[in-house]
Image (cartoon, coloured by chain):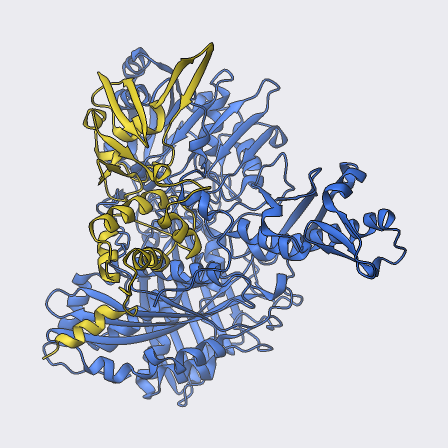
Chain colours: A yellow, B blue
Amino acid sequence: MRLSFILNGHQVVLETAPDRRAIDLLREDVTHEDLLGFDLVCHDHRALEVKEGCGTGECGACSILVDGVHRLACLMLAAQLEGREVVTAAGLGTQADPHPLQRAFAEHGAVQCGYCTPGMVVAAAALLEQNPAPTRAEIRQGLSGNLCRCTGYVKIVDAVQAVAKDFAGEDSAEEPGAPCAENEGERP
Amino acid sequence: MISRPAPRPRADALSKATGTERYALDQAPAESLWAGAYRPGAALGLAHAQVLGLDEASVRAALAVPGVLRVLTAADVPGTNRQGIIHKDQPVLCGEVIRHMGDPVALVLAESAPALRHALALLRADLRPLPAVFDPEQALKKGAPLLHPEHKGGNLLLGARIEKGNAREALKNAPVVLRGEFSTPVQEHAFLEPQGGFAQITPDGLLDMTVSTQAPFRDRFEIGHALGLNPLHIRVRAPYLGGGFGGKDGSTAQCLLGLAALHAKGRPVRLAWDREESILAGYKRHAVRLRYTVGAEKDGTLLALSCRLVYDTGAYAHLGGEVMELGMEHAAGPYRIPHVRIEGRCVYTNNPIAGAFRGFGVAQTCPAFEGMLDALAAKLCLDPLALRRKNALRRGDENPCGVRLSSSVHLVECLDTLAAHPLWTTRRDWRAAAPPFTRRGVGLAAVFNGMGYGRGLPDMAIAKVEFTEAGEFLVYNAVADMGQGNAAAFALLAAQELNQQAGAIQLIQPDTERCHPSGSSSAGRTTYTYGNALLKACGAMRRKLISRAAMPLLADELDSLELIPGAVRHIPTGRVVPLKLLAGYLTHDDRVCVAEFLMPVAQNPPNTGRDFLIGFPHLIFAHAAHLARIEVDELTGRVRVCDYLAVTDGGKVLDRCCFDQQAQGGAAQGLGYALTEDFQLREGRILTGDLSTYLLPTALDVPDVLSLAAEGDEETGPHGLKGVGEVGINGPGPALAAALEDATGTRPHQLPYTPERVLALLGARGSSRKRRRA
């Protein structure tokens, strides 16, 4: 089928099998050649930042935004991208001009092996879009579909919270370990 | 309270956060072929079987799939067809026998991933079932099926003993003697990036491979041996790994990938394990059974320890013997014990292959020796913290294996820091405030982990620094960065030592053609060993640049010159030579400095542990004290970790952010090991074959792990540091067990502490809410 969608601001048109997984399409197929003036130019928009960690929707490494909604590219078929706007971590920001979350992840030590990070950043962006001032517990809830094997999540939550505070311009933070304190409060 | 931003983010942080960093498979050229292994055991439910061959009709059908190029079998493997780091016992492709359900018998090459999948689904192998054995103790019995009949120990890969004093006699006379049995399960590394890479035979006959590996230099020899290639005609490049934790130490996909490249007619070929294949065929943490007897004085002074450990190494050796060695060396805990007898057996079974995993054999022993300490504390009505403090090793002590500790030992400081922390001092009130239908418990653990390879093989690294024509510096990192941040640490060390801005230091990642041979990224040795070599290389570079600048600055005393960012300055006059200009004076050869470092070993090794080929004993150890505060749901048995504190002795802290990352990440992986990662095996079949059944901790399952440093100074380390990558995973197993005992009154002796097992603990004390006071 002929598929047309927007990837990180670029219009993409290509031929593909409708049952091709979105993750394979994004990682492998998004190249095309254009005649620009007299030169044949190869546009390589392959979204190699979309990582495959499990292929079954468990790890979240392939998180992307589809029309602004957090989705998993390993669980979507190519045809489901038709007419949509797809944003990956590379579309959120670049090294020269990073998204505030990407900068915060780097500054707060939320990046170790980095394989989960592009997906984690996308999930965090979706979370802040929905809830600009989340509590620590809400951040943990919002990122619970994205696995990280290196960090123990502490610095990831720190990074997201720091950005949320900047956005909200106020203190949305609680002390670490607060859920237990909440329980204490419920005690009769 | 959010942590303050690090003064300077890791060099690799932003490229990874923006998705521009390229891992091994990301670098595969788009035109690469696809290779994949056919592993018939799982589909047929056979863990041990004779391979009669591939069904010829199925091979024809597979080859008829458009885009399928080759179906390779053992007959197509040149060389020995045996891989392995020390013991070469694992076929690249099995031609005669499969020994576990993940063993491969064929390798398919195809133009596309769909064609590859189609062909793999069509293949059929003729297998004749052989008797199999899945219990390591059964495997040692007479008449048990043999996995490697040529191995002279039968199914015993390695039996070994560490002995000091006379434990038997001392236990006979000890006023208090306690016994305990423990077992620990298989653990899956579950790095987020599964194994894989790509390779190509270059026009001049070189096997050029880019792969997710912890040991690029050693890989060449393993691949060369297996495939009959000259190791020096193999180039291995190791870009940043998407996690390793030991599971990418030794050939994973490398030999299969090399084989594929040999049959790809010069085309690049990629091999990517998916998660299921990673779990089926990847190396795992050894399951271990431990039987302990401990003797002590009535005041809690430890007198003797005798224990027997049985490690299940699965179908192949990998580093089984060495993993058990380290476990045995740590089996008595970080305590002074005069009489010790530690026996270990590492056994082949038809289970999945066990190998290196963070905490390398030690994470398994910690719940046992800490369990014995808590049992002793309970028996003698002693405070568990005071009991540990009383027996804790200090610098200058002889450790249980007989090694005099001349290195830094800050275990007591770890315990003191923990003891002073509010999470400990407020524990009684906190515990008493448990909500209805909930019990609270507080537990602690003292743990340690040896650094480096140990005696018997050189633990070395060679650093290379190049002063570029542009007047900047290239650091040739030779030890793979699997996420722990050693590459960034090297850039930081070089910047400090050369007195340059961080941006003036560029990193080259490990590449056997460009970097100098160095050991693996493992054993908590990475930053210590290469860091030391790098400091030497940078020191030589600094002196060289000063000496070369003396001429243009007309300075006849080198002491009057200093290296400053971007220039060499003549201190008395303030005149400078920009490095850019200075670079023009130097030939290429003169712009390179190389230095090496060899880790020190114990000078007077004790006269024991002679069964170990390599690795015994170790000289330098990282230590830690961990504290867990948990809530147990009385109705469901669910355990929630409310607070977690890790106090770590890693020598001097070079980069606080990286230090905390290791402590927090290690604790989280240990919490998974202790609570949720319930690796299920039935007759060699993995019942938890993907991430929907093998449950990794999510952001909801681990608390904000608090990391504190009990800073010391390891005088042999680069700026005084020791490796802290391993020790963090050793604490949660015992700390959670102690907290559960505190909450339920009964100690769990089997990891993981699943809700079912916790309910059983609660049931063991009935409905009486009798609870022991910590």
* Horizontal side of residue B649 vs B203, given as left or right: left
Assign the N terminus of chain A to one quadrant of the image: top left
Residue at image position (47%, 47%) is B482
Q: To which quarter of the image does residue B382 belong?
A: bottom left
**Residue closest to the eye, B163 or B386:** B386
Q: Nearer the viewer, residue B303 or B139?
A: B303
Q: Is residue A56 visible?
A: no
Query: Which percent across, then down, holds residue A81?
Result: 22, 28
Observer-nearest residue: B544 or B283? B544
Residue that appears at 31% across and 29% down: A7
**Residue B245 image position (x, y, % from top left):** 43, 50
Q: Tell me which corner region of the image, top left, top right, bottom left or bottom right, holds residue B627.
A: bottom left
Pinpoint residue A172: horizontal percent, then vertical percent: 26, 64
Q: Position of residue B247 (x, y in %)?
A: 42, 46
Q: Residue at x 80, y 60 (%)?
A: B571
On screen, residue B311 versus residue B236, left or right, reads left
Q: Check the image and report above or below for B306 versus B755.
A: below
Total numbered badges shown on the rendered structure: 0
B304 left or right, relative to B560 = left
B644 shown above or below A150: below
Residue A17 in view: yes
Specify the farthest residue to the bottom. Answer: B299
Up-down: is A12 above or below B386? above
Query: Residue B581, relative to residue B5: is it above or below?
Result: above
Quadrant showing the C terminus of chain A: bottom left
